Image (spheres, grey):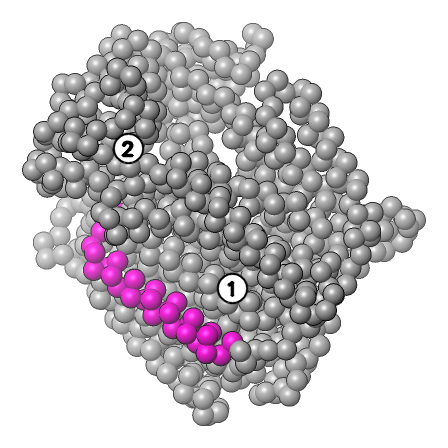
Amino acid sequence: MTRKQRRFALIAGALAVLAGAVALILVALNDNIVFFFSPSDVAARGVSEGQRIRLGGLVAPGSVVRGAATDVTFAVTDGVENVTVHYEGILPDLFREGQGVVVLGAFDHGRLFQADEVLAKHDETYMPPEVADALKRSGHWQGETAQP
Amino acid sequence: MIAELGHFALLLAGALAAAGSLLGLIGAGRGHAGMMAATGRAAYAQFACVAVAFAALTHAYVTSDFSLANVVANSHSAKPLLYKITGVWGNHEGSMLLWVLVLSFFGILIARFGGNLAPRFQARVLAVQALIGALFFAFIIFTSNPFLRVIDPPLDGEDLNPLLQDPGLAFHPPLLYLGYVGLSVTFAFAVAALIEGRVDAVWGRWVRPWTLVSWIALTMGIALGSWWAYYELGWGGWWFWDPVENASLMPWLAATALLHSAIVVERRETLKSWTVLLALVAFSLSLLGTFLVRSGVLTSVHAFANDPARGVFILAILCATIGGSLVLFAWRAPVLKGSNPFQMVSRESALLINNVLLTTGAATVFLGTLYPLAIDLLTGEKISVGPPFFERVFVPVMALLLVVVPFGPRLYWKRAEWERAVRDLWPAALIAILVALSVAAFVSRAPVLALLGVALGAWAIAGAAADLAARIELRTADWRRVMARARILPRSAWGGALAHGGLGVLVLGAVTMSVWQIEDAATLKPGETTEIAGFAVTLREVAPVQGPNYSAVRATIEASREGTVVATLHPERRTYPVTGMATTEAAIWTSGIGDLYAVIGEPNEEGGYIVRVFDNPLAPFLWAGALIMALGGLLSLSDRRFRIAVPGLRRAAPPAAAPAE
């Protein structure tokens, strides 16, 4: 091979790897982007059954019901709308009624939100930024320190 | 008083950095020997000042001086001494001070050991280093000054985030910073080379040890962070594709690529402009990592609630450094011509493939990490990109890389023969296939992709062994000759093989953990038992315990197999009254080839506790693999090639590049 051909082969090879990576990225991004919804967003825009979303808000006071074994149900609220969430597993250390929370999962056919991950930050004054935004939009934002 | 001294020293260090960068750039431009020599002295003085500032802040922490706002916000008098000291860098302001301390330390290393560099080149490297320092000193002084006093000092502090009160995390930031900032040296070398318009074998030889130092530190720092996440977060996993983890992975990937392409520059004087670009990119990714972690733009465990002015300032530094260096590159890179040709099958090609795959890997992580940020800015939509994205994109790229890894060291420079590499490596391929087949035979649930992963891990380990075997002629020569060959084999060859083998060990651990991890959660009352992975796990008792600055409930869990107790585990849930935070302390029992991992949850109304137990096969391989890789790096760093002075370097501008070997 001449020098020119070799260089061409090298560049073609590198471009092929790049094209492969871009294709992989596009396919994977399409399937794995998870949108954030507040309970009001869910009510306004609707979420189809089985679509994975991140749902954020406050754990509605008085809504936590612990069932058998590690079962738990609770409501996520932004002060306007509520969504009932079911979860099986250990709740994070700072999961409390009235605290900000983000849950990852999907609605089942009975419109119950089945969560497979519950995230609450390890800090009492911390509020997940998306939740803070959602509360501001629903008009129930009380500031970083004074939480309901 | 001591705090004021520290504050003053910090300002002085900033001024010295600014002076050093001007002296170096102007002095080197004019060829003024006095100014160039002064650059080195400015570097020493700058380091001394930062060290004083850092010592002053440490003193404030150790003596719990609550008249400093920073100490109030991040310390408490009841905190153990170790965490008072590590608390110095467990917060934003202090960690930035550590950042410039490490930067200045690298500055004096260049001043001290760069004696056999051409003086003009050395002055330019020091000047670039000082310029980066000046930007960061400005950042600290204007937006994150750790020495600000409070008018009305409180009686006690607000305590350090309890998650950071941990020995693993105490040393994670210094190691990570050593790695991040170490890349500033290669950045400075690249910028100086662009200014001079000359990159040669000697440049490659200089850049490699610095890259190695930061690569070793990054490897250890990332491993330590991952280990911490494993035992402290209590989620049973070791890598979560958290933006902050990604922020440290990207520079690591770039540094790994740079490590390999610098070999090509050193030995063959080719891939020059690519290597220079890689050096610029690697440090840019370090800065990006600092930006992502420090500005709080991304949601993560590390994101401290933050002041947006800081984010804008770091963004400005980022734009200036990355933009400036890339413009310089676009302008000067065409000067760096003159590469040596090589055949398709050659060591150069193998290293080029390594570089293409590593940078592609870094690019995929970059996209996945910053995509949510871009979407938020463009559309206001909040999205997140989860681990499945990275698993589907990053993992295949790395798998491809693992296929190539053992071939690289077995190919000659310039023109190599396939047949020879195949002859050296077929036993390794056979071992890899046998390992995968035996896993398929003995493990009940073995998906094809997992077997492929196991085979690739074994291939990397066996391939590294085969490389060493071929180098010491193990299969052809008699033992006397083998011993003699082993003795003269350079340490960098041992180091390289060790690092590749360590990678294989890490891959085995990662594949096994992701496929064969077993998790079970059960609500147990004291005395009750559950079954997991052949263990009977019994909750014996739950008792309150009192720590120095926390109170905890501590469970006693017994794991037994066939009636005999194998391990007793003590997971805890700690509550820190000052911050009102709770943390989970996982209990881990390791058999060397697997971990039994237990976490205790909250009690329910009937007095039962949620107990979560994981069986983590080969989890220790993850940390062992990283450690072996770092050891390989250290061995390579001790190679005598990097220690001997290169003659003829003292000339200001050698007419032609010195041959490498």
* Residue for badge 1: B278
Vertical comparison of B142 with B74: above or below: below
Quarter that holds the N terminus of chain B: bottom left
Looking at this view, is B420 or B505 the one in front? Answer: B420
Query: What's the distance in space between the residues labelled 2 and 1, CA to CA?
Result: 37 Å
- Residue located at (73% from left, 58% from top): B345
* Residue for badge 2: A54
Chain at numbered mark 1:
B
* Label 1 CA crowd tier, 10 Å (few <14, some 14–19, many 20+): many
* Residue extent of the magenta highlight: B304-333
Q: Pick out the residue farthest to the right.
A: B478
Q: Where residue B48 appears, x then y in whole percent?
A: 38, 71
Please state which amino acid type lies under the numbered disc 2.
Answer: Arg
- Residue located at (70% from left, 54% from top): B408
- Taking the image as shown, residue A66 lies to the left or right of residue A17, namely left
SS under mark 1:
helix
Q: Where residue B235 appears, x then y in whole percent?
A: 40, 29
Chain at numbered mark 2:
A
Q: Toward which corner of the image does residue B273 lie, by quadrant? A: bottom right
